[in-house]
Amino acid sequence: MNSKGKEPFIHLTKRGAIPPVKAMMIRLFAVVIALIVCAFITGLTTGINPMEVYSSIIAGAFGSARKAWITFQDVSILLVISLALTIAFRMKFWNIGGEGQVLMGGLGAAACMICLGDKLPNAVVIVLMLISSLVLGGLWGFIPALCKSLWNTNETLSTLMMNYIATQLVLFYTIKWEVPKGSGKIGIINQDSHAGWLPQLFGSKYLLPIIVAVIVTVFVYVYIKYTKHGYEIRVVGESPKTSVYVGINLKKVFIRTMILSGALCGLVGLLLVGGINHTLTSTISDGRGFTAVLVSWMAQFNPFAMIATSFVIVFMDRGAGEIATRFDLNQSFGDILTGIILFFIIGCEFFINYEVHFRTGHKNAAGRKEAGSC
Amino acid sequence: MLGFLAFIPRAVAQSIPLLFGCTGEIVTEKSGNLNLGLPGVMYVGAISGVIGSFFYEGSVGAGEVNAALAILIPMLCCMAGSLLMGLIYSFLVVTLRANQNVTGLAMTTFGVGFGNFFGGSLIKLSGQDIPSISLSKTSTCFRASLPFAKSLGVVGEIFFSYGFLAYLAIVIALAVAFFFKKTRSGLHLRAVGENPATADAAGINVMKYKYLATCIGCVIAGFGGLYYVMDYACGIWSNDAFGDRGWLAIALVIFTLWKADLGIFASILFGGLYILYLYIPTGMDHMEMKELYKMIPYVVTLIVLIFTSMRNRREDQFPQSLGLNYFREER
Amino acid sequence: MRGISKRFDLKQANTDVNFVLYKGEIVSLLGENGSGKTTLMNMLAGIYYPDEGQILIGGREVTISSPAEAYLNGIGMVHQHFKLVDVFSAWENIVLGEDGKYDVAAAKAKIRSICDKYGFVVDPDKKVYNMTVSEKQTVEIVKVIYRGADILILDEPTAVLTPQECERLFEVMRNMKADGKSIIIITHKLNEVMAISDRVVVLRQGRNAGELETAKTTMQEMTDMMVGHAVTLDIERPEPVDPKKRLVIKNICVTDAEGVPKVKNVSFYMNSGEILGIAGISGSGQKELLEAIAGIQAVDEGSVKYIDENENETELIGMHPRDIRELGVALSFVPEDRLGMGLVGNMDISENMMLRTFGESHKWFTDREKPRKVAEDVVDVLEVSTPGLDIPVRRLSGGNIQKILVGREISSNPKVLLTAYAVRGLDINSSYKIYDLINEQKKKGVAVLFVGEDLDVLMQISDKIMVLCDGQVSDIVDAKKVTKNEIGLLMTSLGQEGVGKGEQ
């Protein structure tokens, strides 16, 4: 019989609470390492001086007033989607259908603009756009929630499928409404009348999404932390059995929350179609429904931390765009850099949740060394 | 009838990337890892093969390529690329116990970006003077079908007209099905996915199984990307052409209820649905209908997903620890 | 095991524990809950790794850093929560983790020979999700023997069994002992210690408290060693004052989600100021019955009438659980994992206090002041040891979690208190605290329903005992007159009157 196994070299234990400051330091450290790795990879694959790359990233995001505004606008859009998903995530409902919900909201808004734009007063059109985008986004949240509550259908998979159904629906209508015929594009809607275009606040076309984002951030924070609905969401998320026990109607909470989550995504669709792009394409969401999952998770579902995480993502993305044009590289280079940074941030959570003990040769003298907090 | 017979080979050709992806994802998911990075893995698999073959073709110049090397180099590169993706995922999820959904999505961002970046910049980076990546010589090797296929008429067309990767896909799917049903390791892997604490208590090395299953799954899925670019697309890389096949493969896993042998038929069905719109006459006035037909695979998957959850048969459910990470000392 | 220590997060689970086991003996590991019994054994089984100390087998020092290594050293453990894969059949579970050639026929033959040798009954092809608790446990034990273990660790094996099933288990254990195997049984039931073991090792607060030869000790001595100072085993039973019918249950039938009838035509009534005990093997319909009264479980037929002080009758069936609660019907059900039902592990104590009451006001926002006061009271009165009110309850010890759960229900000043397994897994001191609390409620005129596991306790605290068997009322008996044996019989077979309506 085997007598002596080997001493486990690395031994893990789950950490208790860690001071938030320390946790942030670990994350920051991870980002710094990630940036160094990115610099190496950039240099290696493209031969470009990494420092130059970083300076152009900053230039890309903040190089001019216009660029800065667009950066903030993009942050706002991503932030609202992340917040919408967060509501569902707190319920442990893995809504990765943000993409589809945004598209449906956009579809609703576009439909009103195209079909009613010149028939009704502008204010009425905008109200109808708002309603239809909320309703369609909400519907796309409602369907997976209904299936989950009736038959416990896996929501990660069902929301994923809903994304593609939404994409095809939008493609269907893009071709139905295409201008001119055969172009496969809708083009700018109501270019002359500006019917259904969302108003510019204080003369700035970038301000509206930012204001919406601020309002939604505060709303989601208060909703989750202080309202009864929010309390129910957290109970359901933490312990579904308990929620049944205290008389919370699980199905109702699932459905109500997912409608809200979907509707908030739909609102983004409205902003994108009515306020920013003034057109509808199947790529209008541009993968942000998925990116938002990362944003929300990286912020540990904290609405205010999400401002920072969505900023990091957008900053990298906009910067990468600049690199692409400046060094005549492919736009996708940004995705690689974003991916690497994400890997590091994802990985560093481990050091926040677990403690690593390295065993030295002697028993009882386990060298306790805290990793990751250097 | 003739139209239908012509449809089958197209559907099969369309189905092979899905089958690779589906089989790979089944192996991965059976270990309890929901790898949403599959689309990224398949992109990386494809581009790695392309890079390998690009440099090989470049090195031979105008000369003849060695058929064995032309096949071997892209395949090894593809395996290395997708293996690396598998290792990244396993390291983050298994060793560092990161959230699976998040890791998977990050992998997709990274993988698709990786594919498109190198696909788009390979020529510029290598400083060669050619207009686009067209690996026709390699592709010819990959597309070589059995010599007697042509002489068998319709039968040959339907059964023997494909490149060797197509048959490999089917062999792998059958092998995986056998592995799960008839071998001890298969039993152990299923146990790891169903209930890792139990598997651990039974003395199974949970980490090892999760790592192996995820990495092997990724390698298998990577072949799907390779097949697409070398065989289906005739060796021509174009950005985003692979499209959403990775997600479709994940859908297929649900559709087949995590059974690899079923995947063979299901993927052909999906392949057929995927290109069905080409065969349904819509007339020039209603091109938009094609977009609705393209929706069919997703709607069907959603319905199957809902239907199996309604029926709620224990054997048809996803592995019970899917999406959850295992930490032995969890209390 | 020599000088073993283990720490978790905030808690020291084991400190410098020594433990010796000889070949061919049965040792009881005795201790209150939270005394570190299971943790100690988990280190032997390779689930946890000790921070300090060494393990020697046959005089040689060994390192057990995984269950696989434990098996290699001939150690196998049957955990309290079974480690079985539900969708696998019995034989698949048994051979799991084995190396070598994959020969199904040979494996099944070996399983059969083990069963014959020790007297197990196992159908190798039965799926685990179709099995009863006792069948699952048998599979677990067969698995451990199949893997060649010479040292078996059984963690509270009898908690889920009927007295008859326990006896069968003990029989098998004696067979194994005769075969030269060594067995460690973790328990806190003293009569079992006396019945089965040769020696008893007692742990207290994670440390060695002593070691006794079973033949030369008494229950009293063991109890003293376990708790550290002498405790009276008597539970107070005040006479009911002015009992009036409070809750009348008539012909209730409940079917569970899988379509299995769980409660069959049950009728009884509860008086104010009385404690009605419910005895029965776990899973005889206790949970469903209580949930039906509290409005959580849908009822097929029957009625539950609540009668208030002014003789007004209210039908509870069909009412929302929240409204039932507002009438004064409180339910505290302590599930096996404590946190599963009734508490949210990641929320702090005050947030858990408002779980039941947050819906009462019709405002949008939650009231945070009141729950905080309730939390302070509960922590104070029940002597919950916690660093503060803001700590997630998940990080408290089991006993403290339970005090919070029961305390919350009592704090709502109920008229009817339904408690199930209120002392499940609690140490003796905490248990008495809970008994006192329940008696206090009784004196206040509350009608109490007490579902318990320990028959001794049930017989001492209750005024009447209703015995359930397979979802039916076996009989309702006077707790002062009945004997333990009679209840044991009623639990496994229906009373003489058939579907008994008891005293009604």
Image (spheres, coloured by chain):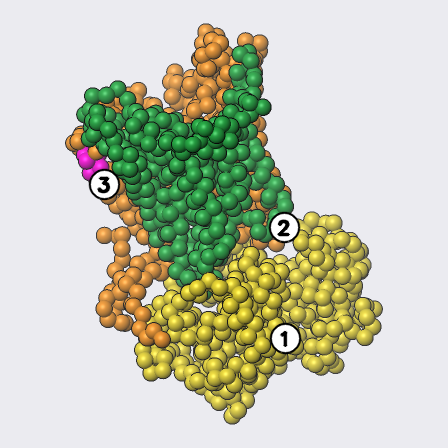
Chain colours: A orange, B green, C yellow
Q: Name the secondary structure under disc 1.
A: helix
Nearer the camera: disc 3 or disc 1: 1
Q: In the image, what residue occupies the spot 51% across and 25% down? A: B6
Is residue A129 on the magenta stretch?
no
The magenta-colored residue range is A39-44
Instruction: From the image, tell me which residue sits under label 1.
Output: C165
- Chain of the residue under label 1: C
> Residue A232, image x and y in percent?
55, 46
Res. A247 mark: 2
Q: Residues within 10 Å of mark 2 (few under 14, many from 20)?
A: some
What amino acid is at disc 2? Gly
Q: Is residue A41 magenta?
A: yes
C188 with respect to C243 (left or right): left
Q: Quadrant of residue C440?
A: bottom right
Q: Is residue A128 above or below residue A372?
A: above
Could you tell me which quadrant the N terminus of chain A lies in?
A: bottom left
Image position of C61 (left or right of C45)? left
Q: Which residue is mark 3?
A: A37
Q: Which x, y percent locates residue B78?
A: 32, 39
Q: Is residue C291 visible?
A: yes
